[in-house]
Amino acid sequence: MRRAVLALLVLCCALSCAKEEEPPTTVAPNDTCLREKKGKVSLLIDAEPIEQSRVTAKFATVTISSRAPRCTTRTIAGCTVTECISADPNAGTQCASLEQITTAGAISVSGGDKPPLTLNSDAKRSYAGFSSAGPRWAPGTEVTVDAAGGDVPAFNTKIVFPSRVEILGPPDYVAKKNPIPLDWKNGVPLQWKPGVGTVYLHLIQGDPELRKQTDIECEAESSKGTYTIPSEALQQLEGTRETGKANALLEVAGRARVELTAGEHKVLVEALYREEPRQLLLALDGAIPK
């Protein structure tokens, strides 16, 4: 009898302890509407295939859900790696994506040996932009961007235009071989004619079947003339067995950028001297096991 009572007490204690150790109920986060006021003014020279210069501007108040899209950003071997996965249809988001175009008034761009130019917004608060043949700014030119103000308060900044990134190697890149095989284990060594400013390297991979996009952004000093895209960052990409088909893109540009605040708006002013993008092949057989 005593043994039966003791066994019952032990069983009750075990059940009580198990109940106390149950994890708390997970509550799904509330879906909140995130609002951001931002803008960008871009001074662009496209080096290939036809050399031309452009100026674009856009300002907006953007509203998105706090639960979609799902993006994570990490720093790997000095590069910024951003991975975004599309939200599930049943994610329960209540906020519809909304973009309300705004204006910063007339935007004047001056500097260099060309006459100043002005961008004006239309009735829909959009900027038509400007384009012309050939390079409008020489490397090292100080350019002034002055916005008169509107929905976005007035702002003024200066930016030094970067050099073109004239790639000297590897041979496949110079020859525009399509697609260019990528070396997972040793990284991608690039050589270029040294210049002023920063070299911006941007690898992009997106696969609708994976519902995923990966962006790898790296920077190097143009004056050094060389940089190897690190294998540690490349490992975040996906390989393929289709050896005749590109599955990633590499953008290279000389870049300068200024980030500023105008009232509640975050404004990016950038200068880009862009090369023609190259198609890359990331073969599964050469991939480093994850």
Image: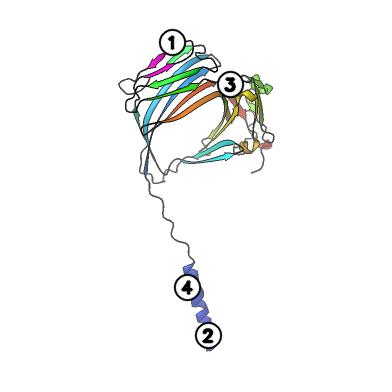
Residue 44: image x %, image y %? Answer: 49, 19
Question: With 197 as the anchor, is 118 left or right in this view?
Answer: left
Queried whether the magenta region covers residue 112, the answer comes back as: yes
Quick check: marks 3 and 1 in contact, CB under 8 Å?
no
Q: Is mark 3 on a helix, strand or loop?
A: loop
Quick check: marks 3 and 4 in contact, CB under 8 Å?
no
In space, the residues marked 2 and 4 are separated at their CA atoms by 18 Å
In space, the residues marked 2 and 1 are separated at their CA atoms by 100 Å
Question: With 271 as the anchor, is 28 left or right in this view?
Answer: left
| Magenta stretch in the rendered image | 107-127
CA neighbours of label 2 inside 10 A, class few (<14), some (14 to 19), many (20+): few
In space, the residues marked 4 and 1 are separated at their CA atoms by 82 Å
Q: Which amino acid does label 3 sit on?
A: Val
Q: Which amino acid does label 1 sit on?
A: Pro
Q: Is mark 4 on a helix, strand or loop?
A: helix
Q: Which amino acid does label 4 sit on?
A: Ser
As drawn, the label of residue 16 is: 4
Q: Is mark 1 on a helix, strand or loop?
A: loop
Colour convention: rainbow
User: Which mark is in front, 4 or 1?
Assistant: 1
Question: Along the polypeptide, which appears first: circle 3 or circle 2?
Answer: 2
Quarter where residue 95 is shown: top left
User: Which mark is in front, 3 or 4?
Assistant: 3
